[in-house]
Image (cartoon, grey):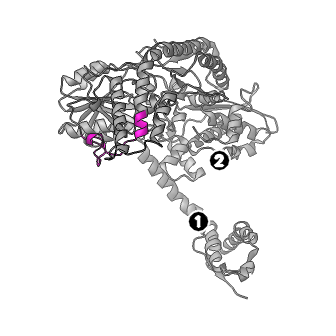
């Protein structure tokens, strides 16, 4: 038996907003019975672009029903712009998480929402874009690429958990591996654009503020950014850090580590003694 | 909340008599049956008795019984033994609806030097005997066909199939894990060479099984290293569980009539009750000869895991052939092999009863199922109530 969160159980046992909105002006239908889950989302959007009412009908397992119920709760009262930003991860988070094999239920929710919003805007029902990679579940390369990008997927198994692709006869596994390799290759240069000096300093400041300072202050310490010369980041230690024997280790592992992760892997942290 | 347990093809409760019989082997009689001293030796005698009891249920000789750790080990041992002893033969015949212990092993072997033929079944889960007959060749090392299907309860004509194999000099193995204890089996004048049993399917504990090997059948052990089971299966005997299995086999013999009359009547009542009250459902394998305890019902337009979880709220335990319950994304390979549409396979529920089920429990389930199905159908975008037809298995 799957380990579902209390929130998933609650939305499965007592689903919110089940049914169809009678005077719906946005309808999104995704999935199929052959695939094992399907979702029909009906919305009533008012003249100001606010989602007044949302209801769902689901064919699927407990987490598919819970994901659809959660989605309707999340979008009711929201503007279309706000609703557009909801990702599959947001749906999973709302439910306190989903078993990884069930993440495709949250993807189904996001797809239905997108289809409904497109329907509201009068966009024609999209022909399936891209080429089919997984014949068993009718999943295209574009859908797979998107899931990889949005959820930072690294393995065929993860792609299957999120999109179902590769979960049948498995003959497309090599193709999925190629797509993963392709997307990850593209992403690296995108994630690390060449930084101007001003941009670099700003990013270093932001990273210190949001990622580094809170954990140092938790232990009564702090650091101050003194200067940035090329890739050398000069900092001074404050508070308990200034007298701590482990400060060097902290600078190297925590400070430099975070700066590598969020700014550039070329940065070197140096302590300035005043 | 009381538990209504109707998942006996998954596992069964240890019978109280069985538990009582095995307990002394954990404290008073913990000796090693291989020891020279009386303290251990007396356990060896009791294992002999257990072996006799198992043999009696099967119409076999005690020497033909090898104790193993589970049904899967027995299946693996049987197939690998035949491949070792039938040198030069590289063909395996099996069916599309086997338990994974056979299916996955054969799939693996098929990737290497062996050729595997999977015989199809019809809509009711009946084996295609013409295809089976045609599949047997000079290169065939072993046939492995299950006696009764774990998901639908459909029974294969294994005796007839074994005769066909025997007349061509081919070793015949049957996975009888679901059949033993539920239907009478007599191997005395049979053509079956090897047969697998799992203890926990017939009210013995988990962790004990049997491989029956007909006297005179060429055999190569799987677990090597000990003289136990006359060198046919190394490893210190799981004495308490072996004693338990002996007791369970004795009880199964006693309860055989009850199983095939009262339990069968309960199953039929459950099935009819559900079919009468719930539109658009069908019995999978209902047209085949079936085990007396099993009913596999598909409900149109809804998904099995959701049904199971709502049943769970009432303490009702069963299984589903839906993709979501298995962890894979495709529904049961058994139902797909039978050509059950995906839509119906996703919504399939297997009820499997035992002698411990009561009529009150059946009534309780028949009362609870219809509103569960209705609740989920109301949520389903595919449910069209106006098409309410109920199709039975035929």
What's the chain of the residue with tag 1? A
Task: Say what secondary structure mark 1 lies in.
Answer: loop
Q: Position of residue B38 (x, y in %)?
A: 35, 43
Q: Position of residue B80 (x, y in %)?
A: 28, 39
Give the residue displayed 68% in from the left and 72% down from the top: A204
Q: Quadrant of the N terminus of chain A?
A: top right
Residue B379, relative to residue A144: is it above or below? above
Residue B314: in magenta span: no
| Residue A52 in view (yes/no) | yes
| Residue A121 in view (yes/no) | no
Left or right of residue A143, residue B41 in this image: left
Residue A74, relative to residue B311: is it above or below? below
Q: Which residues are magenta?
A: B220-243
Residue A227, relative to residue B173: is it above or below? below
Left or right of residue A151, residue B92 in this image: left
Q: Quadrant of the C terminus of chain A?
A: bottom right
> Residue tagged by mark 2?
A89
What's the chain of the residue with tag 2? A
> Residue tagged by mark 1?
A192
Residue B366, relative to residue A40: is it above or below? above
What type of secondary structure mainly makes up the magenta span? loop
- The mark nearer the N terminus, 2 or 1, is 2
Q: Nearer the viewer, mark 2 or mark 1?
A: 2
Neighbour class for label 1 at 10 Å: few (<14), some, many (≥20)? few
Q: Position of residue B109 (x, y in %)?
A: 30, 40
Q: Mark 2–mark 1 contact, CB under 8 Å? A: no
Q: Nearer the viewer, residue B5 or A102?
A: B5
Left or right of residue B283, residue A174 in this image: left
Left or right of residue B81, residue A42 in this image: right
């Amino acid at each position: 038996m799957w380990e579902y969160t209390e929130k998933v159980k609650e939305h499965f046992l007592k689903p919110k907003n089940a049914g169809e909105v009678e005077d719906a002006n946005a309808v999104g239908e995704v999935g199929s019975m052959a695939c094992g889950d399907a979702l029909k989302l009906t919305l009533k959007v008012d003249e100001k672009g606010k989602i007044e009412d949302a209801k769902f009908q689901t064919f699927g397992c407990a987490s598919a029903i819970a994901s659809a119920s959660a989605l309707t709760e999340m979008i009711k009262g929201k503007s279309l712009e706000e609703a557009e930003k909801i990702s599959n991860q947001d749906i999973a988070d709302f439910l306190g998480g989903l078993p990884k094999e069930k993440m495709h239920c949250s993807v189904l929710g996001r797809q239905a929402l997108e289809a409904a919003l497109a329907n509201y805007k009068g966009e024609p029902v999209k022909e399936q874009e891209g080429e089919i990679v997984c014949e068993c579940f009718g999943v295209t390369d574009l859908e797979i690429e998107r899931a990889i990008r949005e959820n930072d997927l690294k393995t065929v198994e993860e792609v299957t958990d999120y999109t179902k692709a590769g979960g049948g006869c498995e003959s497309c596994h090599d193709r999925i591996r190629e797509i993963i390799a392709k997307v990850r290759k593209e992403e690296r240069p995108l994630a690390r654009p060449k930084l101007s000096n001003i941009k670099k300093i700003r990013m270093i400041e932001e990273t210190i503020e949001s990622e580094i300072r809170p954990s140092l202050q938790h232990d009564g310490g702090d650091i101050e950014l003194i200067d940035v010369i090329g890739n050398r980041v000069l900092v001074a230690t404050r508070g308990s850090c200034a007298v701590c024997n482990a400060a060097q280790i902290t600078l190297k592992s925590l400070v430099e580590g975070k700066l590598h992760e969020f700014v550039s892997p070329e940065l070197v942290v140096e302590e300035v003694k005043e | 909340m009381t538990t209504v347990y109707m998942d006996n093809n998954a596992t069964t409760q240890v019978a109280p008599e069985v538990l009582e019989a095995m307990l002394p082997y954990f404290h008073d009689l913990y000796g090693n049956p291989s020891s020279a001293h009386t303290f251990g030796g007396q356990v060896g005698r009791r294992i002999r008795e257990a072996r006799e009891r198992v043999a009696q249920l099967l119409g076999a000789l005690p020497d033909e019984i090898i104790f193993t750790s589970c049904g899967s080990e027995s299946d693996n041992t049987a197939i690998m033994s035949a491949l070792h002893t039938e040198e030069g033969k590289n063909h395996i015949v099996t069916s599309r609806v086997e338990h994974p212990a056979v299916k996955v092993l054969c799939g693996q072997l098929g990737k290497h030097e062996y050729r595997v033929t999977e015989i199809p079944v019809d809509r009711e889960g009946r084996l295609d005997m013409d295809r089976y007959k045609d599949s047997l060749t000079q290169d065939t090392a072993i046939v492995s066909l299950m006696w009764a299907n774990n998901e639908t309860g459909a029974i294969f004509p294994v005796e007839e199939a074994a005769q066909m194999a025997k007349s061509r000099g081919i070793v015949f193995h049957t996975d009888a894990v679901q059949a033993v204890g539920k239907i009478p089996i007599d191997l005395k004048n049979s053509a079956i060479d090897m047969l697998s049993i799992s203890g926990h399917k017939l009210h013995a504990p988990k962790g004990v099984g049997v491989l029956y090997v007909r006297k005179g059948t060429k055999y190569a052990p799987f677990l090597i290293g000990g003289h136990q089971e006359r060198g046919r299966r190394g490893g210190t005997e799981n004495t308490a569980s072996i004693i338990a299995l002996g007791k369970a086999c004795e009880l199964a013999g006693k309860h055989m009539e009850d199983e095939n009359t009262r339990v069968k009547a309960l199953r039929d009542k459950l099935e009819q009750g559900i079919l009468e009250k719930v539109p658009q459902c069908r019995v999978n394998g209902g047209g085949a000869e079936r085990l007396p305890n099993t009913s596999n019902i598909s409900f149109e337009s809804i998904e099995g895991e959701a049904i199971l979880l709502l049943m769970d709220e009432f303490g009702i335990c069963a299984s589903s052939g839906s993709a979501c319950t298995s962890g894979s994304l495709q529904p049961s390979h058994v139902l797909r092999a039978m050509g059950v549409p995906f839509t119906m396979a996703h919504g399939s529920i297997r009820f499997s009863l035992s002698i411990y089920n009561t009529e009150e429990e059946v009534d309780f389930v028949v009362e609870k199922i219809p509103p569960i199905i209705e609740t989920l159908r109301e949520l389903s975008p595919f449910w069209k109530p106006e098409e309410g037809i109920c199709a039975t298995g035929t």
